[in-house]
């Protein structure tokens, strides 16, 4: 193995790790006893510097100016434009979470907070670039453990601890399932490298392996019926953390699901056995998510149910088992995550001063006090609802397009995925209702007693984050070609 | 050129957000006028002897999905594009006095214009559908935020839910078409002539059905029209109701000729049902806006009747029934758009001045406001189909076409004409004749600005009635082309 090459390939991650240690070190030594605001400021700056440096190297790698090995022998790292783009995107989104985390000093353990954020980001970067069963699993656990810990950071809040405990126990069990599934997969094929698994034969063991994997990843993606943790965690985790759970970790899990299913592509019988399971998960998630969201009054809880529903849509693209299907799934999850992070960002900014979890009615009259935030929220929610010309529309269109194209010989509604697509479409009409209900509070209803919720100072970093997220959602809707081109690899 | 026309209002909308609130209306007007100027210029340059598309633009957009950005103008959309480009600045002018959150209002209105222009010019399903849906967003908010009455919330929601469900069905239909043919291009799809299952045909039909609307899926219409602010109602009835019929002409007729042939009878039956339903329900309406909404339902259904006639073989007839029907439909889109928008504007003025819009709340207004009455009479008579006005020319063409191929249905449809005459004349009688209602004695007549808004409509109504050839020329070549 060429260690110099490896070092070069992992340079972005190394930079982030260095920043992580500096942040911890500075916080423990020089800033001991300093004001909380100051410590948040410094930790945020160091973390941001690390991520920016990492991102810069990643961009150089994508542009091809750095000589780069394509992959390691065992598939631990597969570096191509597609995986590197996802990694860069995750770094950029992680960068966006930092200013949100800095706004609200929920915990005195400042540097741990940021270190965990960086660790989660690192883990996500590894998940999307790894094609090795063990490597990907370990990376996914890195993400999960960081997220469990971050959920409970606000120790003053009892509900937070309860949510974190739920998250941890469910998460541990599901990781067990995932690992069990991966071990069966390894047992059936004798390989750890996903890129080398070819010519899978249909066997009960493989079906079982994949079903276990669906349970494990279903938890990470918040697919019904493995979604029970999501509403509590979304509601009670610190808002920036909930945003990161609802965006970055979703991208990582979806990318891993696709990578794990890649060997099934040319195994028709196995594929036929897995499709009903995936379709059932999709339908169930769409029903639970959309109907559950209808009666929520807490905004973050509503977003959790919307995440469940969106994971359901996502599977419509997965069952296509085609190149177009994979591209559509990645595109959709990216678009969804951008909008989701943005929505959580707006909520975080607006509820700084609230002191409790925000009800939808708390946002009444927001249009009058902070029109910019209201417009940004409009963009994020309409994108999730799939209203053109925002990216969410194109994402859904692409998913359904891929699902329909996948079975060209289908002559009836039952053969192809028509019924699934029709169901998803009807469910997305249902979703309009609750998205519009939230937007109504933001844009239409006047504040109850004349005092609408108002943010403390937004700050330039948060402002830039929210603006660029909104712009990205619009740009990907109008001109997705460059991004799709990058992913194609 | 077409792209510039479509995007001008959006640019205006973005500018509005940057400029002071008081400037919003002026910016909106400029955006709409730019579009109108471009539309007029294109129609003047339009080569009526050439077959096929003109001013077309085609750029690869999302190759992964087989989507091109493809727009163009031909006989089918030339007139509706002019109509929408004309009504756009008029709608802005009609809302000149609007003071409630003007920036939001005019930005939404401009967005609506873009959606409409885009729908009428797009020739690739993807962005056609994008515009088709885009129209909903501003309309929903315009009705909900700026509409009148407590009913507006449910009206806006019903309107959106109905249309979106229709669109969903249509989307599946087109995904199927793409899977079969590998293209979303309307023109290419028409050339390929795919065999499709009746379910798919119904799915696509459903989207248009709701939008036209045809009975029994029209129940969203009257509440939405009644609740919408007047300028928006002008656009709803004048232009948006044309989107559905345009969809029939652009999609059903060229892409599904076989299916249309098979189901022409059913389609005409439903059109007939809608015509009669609209007319007879309108007889019982006392709210002027609801009355006009049902009248609009009835008039647009004539177009669908004409479309149905295109599906019935006309071999061995002395007249070219298909050409007559097709030109009639296209002219009816134009004529009804003008008259209905004008009438909604006038009723809106009544409401603004008196706060009333019941059919029986007025009386003797022709003595109080002679100019207002004159314009109202002209537009009503145009709706009625009085000779020398646009409505007559269009309906005459449609009926000559349909009578040749389906005399029974046509005769039954004339019953609708009769009922139309009754309710429109009753409206005129109750509002404008008889004793003057005390409280309306001081109602001001039309101001100069209002006359300015109405003048182009009146001129075109007469022009299309007395010399329809100017307008029919655009679609002439089209009818010769397609058998």
Image (tube, grey):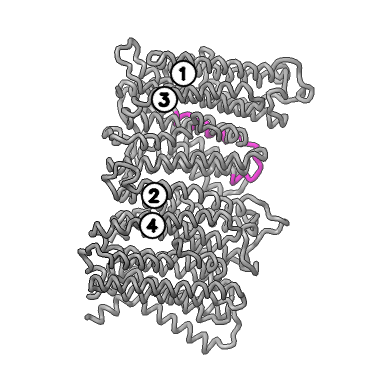
Crowdedness near tag 1: few (<14), some (14–19) or many (≥20) residues, C-alpha within 10 Å: many
User: Which stretch did the figure color magenta?
Assistant: B80-104
Chain letter for mark 1: B
Q: Quadrant of residue B91?
A: top right
Chain letter for mark 3: B
Residue A52 visible in the picture: no
Q: Are marks 3 and 4 in contact (CB under 8 Å)?
A: no
Residue identifier under label 4: A315
- B419 lies left or right of A67: right
How much space separates mark 2 and mark 3, taking CA atoms?
30 Å
Residue identifier under label 1: B394
Q: Are marks 2 and 4 in contact (CB under 8 Å)?
A: no
Q: Are marks 2 and 3 in contact (CB under 8 Å)?
A: no
Tell me what residue is drawn at x 32 percent, y 19 percent: B313
* 1 or 3: tag closer to the N-terminus: 3
Give above or below for B424 relative to A190: above
Magenta segment includes B87 = yes
x and y percentages locating residue A192 in the rendered image: 26, 74
Q: Residue furthest bottom?
A: A29
On the same chain: label 2 and label 4? Answer: yes
Chain letter for mark 4: A
């Amino acid at each position: 193995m060429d260690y110099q090459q490896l070092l070069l390939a992992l340079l972005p991650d190394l930079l982030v790790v260095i920043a992580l240690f500096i942040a911890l070190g500075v916080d423990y030594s020089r800033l001991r006893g300093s004001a909380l605001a100051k410590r948040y400021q410094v930790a945020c700056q160091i973390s941001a510097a690390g991520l920016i440096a990492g991102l810069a190297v990643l961009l150089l790698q994508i542009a091809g100016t750095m000589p780069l090995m394509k992959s390691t022998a065992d598939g631990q790292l597969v570096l191509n434009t597609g995986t590197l783009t996802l990694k860069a995107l995750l770094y950029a989104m992680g960068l966006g979470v930092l200013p949100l985390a800095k706004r609200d000093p929920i915990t005195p353990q400042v540097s741990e907070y940021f270190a965990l954020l960086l660790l989660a980001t690192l883990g996500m970067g590894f998940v999307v670039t790894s094609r090795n069963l063990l490597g990907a699993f370990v990376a996914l656990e890195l993400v999960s453990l960081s997220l469990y810990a971050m959920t409970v950071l606000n120790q003053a809040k009892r509900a937070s601890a309860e949510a974190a405990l739920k998250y941890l126990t469910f998460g541990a069990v599901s990781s067990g399932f995932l690992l069990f599934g991966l071990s069966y997969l390894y047992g059936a094929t004798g390989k750890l490298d996903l890129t080398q698994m070819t010519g899978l034969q249909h066997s009960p063991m493989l079906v079982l392996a994949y079903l276990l994997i669906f349970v494990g990843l279903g938890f990470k993606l918040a697919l019904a019926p493995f979604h029970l943790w999501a509403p509590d965690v979304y509601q009670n985790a610190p808002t920036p953390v909930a945003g990161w759970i609802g965006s970055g970790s979703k991208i990582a899990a979806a990318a891993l699901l696709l990578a794990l299913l890649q060997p099934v592509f040319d195994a028709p019988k196995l594929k036929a056995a897995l499709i009903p399971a995936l379709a059932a998960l999709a339908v169930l998630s769409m029903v639970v998510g959309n109907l559950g969201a209808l009666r929520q009054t807490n905004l973050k809880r509503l977003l959790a149910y919307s995440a469940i529903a969106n994971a359901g849509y996502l599977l419509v693209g997965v069952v296509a088992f085609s190149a177009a299907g994979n591209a559509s799934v990645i595109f959709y999850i990216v678009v969804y995550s951008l909008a989701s992070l943005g929505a959580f960002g707006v909520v975080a900014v607006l509820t700084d001063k609230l002191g409790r979890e925000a009800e939808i009615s708390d946002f009444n009259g927001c249009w009058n006090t902070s029109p910019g935030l209201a417009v940004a929220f409009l963009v994020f929610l309409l994108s999730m609802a799939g209203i053109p010309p925002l990216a969410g529309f194109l994402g859904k269109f692409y998913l359904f397009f891929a699902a329909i194209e996948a079975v060209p010989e289908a002559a009836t509604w039952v053969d192809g995925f028509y019924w699934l697509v029709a169901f998803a479409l009807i469910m997305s009409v249902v979703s309009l209702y609750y998205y519009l209900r939230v937007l109504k509070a933001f844009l239409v209803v006047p504040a109850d007693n004349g005092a609408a919720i108002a943010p403390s100072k937004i700050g330039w970093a948060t402002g830039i984050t929210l603006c660029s997220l909104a712009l990205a959602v619009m740009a990907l809707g109008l001109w997705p070609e460059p991004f799709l081109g990058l992913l194609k690899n | 050129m077409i792209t510039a026309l479509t995007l001008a209002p959006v640019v205006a909308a973005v500018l509005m957000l940057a400029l002071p609130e008081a400037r919003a209306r002026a910016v909106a007007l400029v955006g709409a006028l730019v579009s109108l100027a471009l539309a007029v210029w294109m129609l003047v340059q339009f080569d009526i002897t050439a077959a096929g598309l003109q001013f077309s633009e085609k750029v690869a957009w999302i190759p992964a999905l087989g989507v091109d950005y493809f727009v163009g103008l031909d006989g089918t959309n030339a007139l509706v594009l002019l109509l929408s480009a004309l009504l756009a600045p008029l709608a802005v002018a009609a809302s000149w006095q609007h003071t409630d959150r003007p920036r939001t209002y005019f930005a939404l209105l401009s967005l609506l214009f873009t959606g409409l222009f885009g729908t009428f010019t797009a020739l690739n399903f993807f962005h056609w559908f994008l515009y088709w849906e885009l129209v909903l967003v501003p309309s929903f908010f315009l009705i909900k935020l700026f509409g009148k009455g407590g009913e507006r919330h449910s009206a806006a929601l019903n309107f959106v839910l109905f249309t979106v469900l229709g669109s969903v069905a249509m989307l599946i239909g087109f995904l199927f078409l793409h899977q079969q043919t590998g293209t979303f291009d309307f023109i290419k799809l028409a050339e390929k002539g795919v065999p499709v299952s009746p379910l798919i045909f119904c799915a696509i039909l459903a989207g248009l059905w709701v939008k036209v609307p045809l009975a029994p899926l029209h129940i969203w219409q009257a509440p939405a029209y009644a609740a919408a602010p007047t300028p928006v109602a002008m656009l709803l009835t004048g232009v948006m109701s044309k989107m559905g019929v345009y969809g029939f002409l652009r999609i059903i007729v060229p892409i599904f000729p076989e299916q249309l042939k098979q189901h022409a009878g059913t389609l005409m039956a439903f059109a007939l049902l809608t015509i009669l339903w609209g007319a007879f329900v309108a007889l019982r309406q006392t709210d002027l806006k609801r009355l006009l909404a049902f009248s609009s339902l009835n008039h647009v259904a004539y177009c669908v009747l004409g479309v149905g006639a295109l599906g019935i073989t006309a071999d061995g007839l002395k007249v070219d029934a298909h050409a007559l029907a097709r030109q009639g439909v296209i002219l009816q889109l134009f004529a009804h758009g003008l008259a209905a928008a004008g009438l909604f504007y006038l009723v809106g003025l009544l409401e603004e001045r008196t706060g009333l819009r019941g059919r029986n709340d007025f009386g003797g207004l022709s003595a109080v406001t002679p100019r207002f009455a004159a314009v109202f009479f002209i537009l009503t008579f145009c709706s009625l189909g009085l000779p020398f006005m646009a409505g007559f020319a269009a309906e005459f063409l449609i009926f000559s076409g349909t009578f040749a191929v389906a005399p029974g249905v046509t005769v039954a449809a004339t019953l609708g004409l009769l009922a139309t005459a009754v309710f429109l004349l009753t409206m005129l009688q109750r509002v404008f004749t008889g004793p003057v209602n005390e409280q309306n004695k001081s109602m001001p007549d039309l101001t100069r600005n209002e006359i300015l808004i109405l003048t182009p409509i009146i001129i075109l109504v007469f022009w299309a009635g007395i010399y329809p050839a100017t307008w029919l020329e655009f679609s002439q070549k089209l009818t010769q082309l397609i058998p």
